[in-house]
Amino acid sequence: MYEYLVGQVTYVCPFYVVLEVAGIGYKVQFANPFRLQIDGNKKRKIYVYQAVSENGVTLFGFLNLAEKQLFVKLLKVSGIGPKSALAILANNDHAGLIKAIQTNDIGYLTKFPGVGKKTAQQIALDLKGKVDDLTDQQPDSDQSSQPDTADQDENLTESVAALQALGYKAREIKAITPALKKFNADSTDAYLSEALRLLMKR
């Protein structure tokens, strides 16, 4: 029904953002909500996908059209629901994902939360030849100034909460936490991106 919304980001948490459009606050779930920041009157264009289920209506958000198209293609795979598709897209290396599908790299695909060998094989089978037209468009990142230690602790905590929301297990998060604590990031988005990179290397 909706292609995109243009409005102001008024709330960001590990699970979703609120985008205010013409006085109405839309709750939009993101793979990584912290790619968006509250920035006064600045308006953002957010591509959205509306999912209707027995539990209600949910909006899923994306920073560019290619990301949304990749999400829609993933939903067509048997065994992949919106939450799994969102967790897969949380890793910004969409070129790596597309390459894994093209080359039938099952090992790469099983690194995503909730994706076992059978589902990974299904992804490669169903989407091979159907994602070649999608380019790796890195989402825009809001820049912020270098934080103090308290800000870094908060950013790390928020990134861990976001990983939990994506479905990563406690033991997986615990294994990369020491490396994250040594990572000098200036935003939650940066911490989360590094965490996802580390998880994909394991």
Image (cartoon, grey):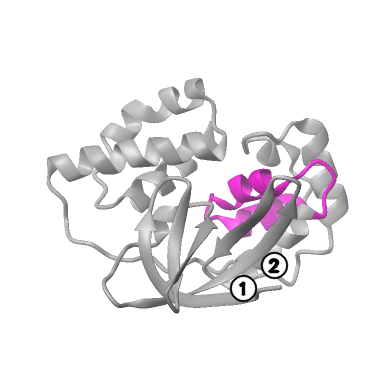
Instruction: Tell me where residue 115 appears, x and y as whole percent.
Output: 71, 36
Q: Nearer the viewer, residue 188 or 8?
A: 8
Q: Nearer the viewer, residue 5 or 184?
A: 5
Residue depicted at x 52% and y 68% = 63
Instruction: Tell me where residue 153 appears, x and y as whole percent.
Output: 22, 37
Q: Are marks 1 and 2 in contact (CB under 8 Å)?
A: yes
Amino acid type at image mark 2: Gln
| The disc label shown at residue 69, or none | 2
Residue 94: in magenta span: yes
Residue that numbered label 1 is attached to = 65
Amino acid type at image mark 1: Leu
Instruction: Tell me where residue 69 appears, x and y as whole percent.
Output: 69, 67
Instruction: Look at the numbered disc 1 and give the secondary structure of its residue.
Output: helix
Residue depicted at x 61% and y 65% = 67
Residue depicted at x 28% and y 44% = 155
Per the model, the C-alpha gap separating discs 1 and 2 is 6 Å
| Span of residues in magenta | 76-101
| Residue 152 horizontal side relative to residue 27, left or right | left
Q: Quadrant of the N terminus?
A: bottom right
Q: Is residue 143 above or below residue 173?
A: below
User: Which quarter of the figure has residue 37?
Assistant: bottom left
| The disc label shown at residue 45, or none | none
Q: Is residue 106 above or below residue 65?
A: above
Residue 104: in magenta span: no
Q: Is residue 128 above or below residue 141?
A: above
